[in-house]
Amino acid sequence: MKRVKIIDLPKVEDSRGNLTFLQNNDQIPFEIKRVFWTYDIPGGQTRGGHAYQSQEEVIIALSGSFDVIVTNQDGTENKFCLNRSYYGLYIPANNWRHMENFATNALSVHLSSSVYDETDYIRNFEDYKSNEYQKHNDLRL
Ligand code: TYD
């Protein structure tokens, strides 16, 4: 069963600083087809606020911190505070998520299982609430 979860990425500690890496599919449960990032987010802004029908992603706060809020179909929320460069938040398809509480200079990197496809977005929360995808896949937290 696919669930939202924090993936602890490898961390090589060194007196000169830390190093984290991703390679092949060793850390990420899908083949990465696209990487995008958001940055220079003004204070108080939110990003996201949609679900994907089939796309899976891993979100990493490469620098700084922010919160990812996953909203279930019943309206309940789960908050994940990304504040370490070695946390990857895995989000399976059909989970409504948005990002908020961005620290100054926060860098949010998204590893995605597919290329950009607007038709894969569920942008209307009412559609998300009434859709059958999440029930079929039992993706509840
Ligand atoms: P979107 O995914 O809607 O981000 P947010 O929900 O945070 O606003 O993307 C914002 C815009 O950027 C949208 O017009 C589509 C475009 N975009 C691309 O062209 N390619 C991409 O890979 C992504 C993620 C977005």
Image (cartoon, helix red, strand yellow):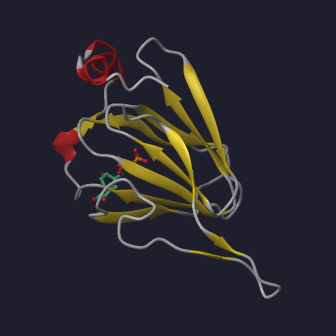
In the image, residue 20 sits, relative to residue 30, either above or below, namely below
Q: Nearer the viewer, residue 140 or 120?
A: 140
Q: Quadrant of residue 3?
A: top left
**25 on left or right of 89:** left
Residue visible at 46% across and 46% down in the picture: 90
Q: Is residue 118 above or below residue 33?
A: above
Please name the residue shown 62% across and 54% down the image: 42
- The mark total stands at 0
Residue shown at the point (24%, 35%) measured from the top left: 53
Q: Determine the residue located farthest toward the bottom in the rendered image.
A: 16
The residue lying furthest to the left in this view is 119
Is 60 rendered above or below residue 50? Answer: below
The answer to which quarter of the image holds residue 120 is top left
- Quadrant location of the N terminus in the rendered image: top left
Residue that sits furthest to the right in the current view: 15
Who's the residue at 58% across and 27% down the image? 78
Residue 32, x across and y down, in percent? 31, 63
Where is residue 139 drawn, in percent x and y?
38, 26
- Frontmost residue, 22 versus 38: 22
Viewer-proximal residue among 20 and 106: 20
Picture coordinates of residue 4, whole percent (x, y) = 48, 37
Vertical side of 131 occupied by 141: above or below:
below
Observer-nearest residue: 130 or 20?
20
State the image coordinates of residue 96 (x, y, percent, origin top left): 41, 31
